[in-house]
Amino acid sequence: MNNNIQKYRFICTLTFGDVYGQIMVWLITITISLAAALALMGARRPVYALVTVGLVVLLSLPFLLFAFVTTLLNHIEVAPFEPGMKMEPMPGNVSQQQPVQATN
């Protein structure tokens, strides 16, 4: 067996501010498509309104998912873990906080 295998530490530094712009752009896109659908509702065939919204969502969703995934992957750090290294929680990490205890 190989004893030189190192352990690795995965750190995710993603914050809400990193994806906030992407969410806003997608919400604006959906709002514009709904406005276009309402404009088409007065036409002779209101089915076009539903098709417009469906088409915009269908075409924009892959781009949104691609942006989210690439942003997430860009914020994952991999560092080798050395035996003498001390693991400290990152500041602001909610998963490291202690739950509230009820007092009598």
Image (cartoon, grey):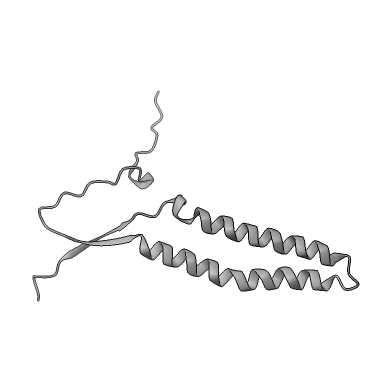
Residue farthest along the bottom direction in this orientation: 1
Q: In the visual, does 27 lie left or right of 99?
A: right
Within the image, what quadrant is residue 18 found in?
bottom left
Image label count: 0
Residue 85 horizontal/vertical position (percent): 14, 52
- Residue at 23 percent of width and 46 percent of height: 88
Indicate left or right for 102 with 51 as reference.
left
Residue positioned 38% across, 32% down in the render: 101
**In the rendered image, which quarter contains the N terminus?**
bottom left
Q: Where does residue 53 sit, x and y in percent of width and height?
A: 72, 68
Whether 21 is drawn above or below 54: the answer is above
Q: Position of residue 4 (x, y in %)?
A: 9, 70
Q: Position of residue 15 (x, y in %)?
A: 42, 51
Residue 10 falls left or right of residue 21: left
Quadrant holding the C terminus: top left
Q: Residue at x 85, y 65 (%)?
A: 41
Name the side, left or right, on which 73 lies relative to 8: right
Q: Which of the 4 image quarters holds residue 46?
A: bottom right
Q: Is residue 39 above or below residue 96?
A: below
Write the residue at 62% across / 73% down: 59
Q: Work out whether residue 99 or residue 73 is closer to the camera in this orientation and state it.
A: 73
The one of 81 and 18 positioned closer to us in this rendering: 18
Q: Residue furthest top?
A: 104
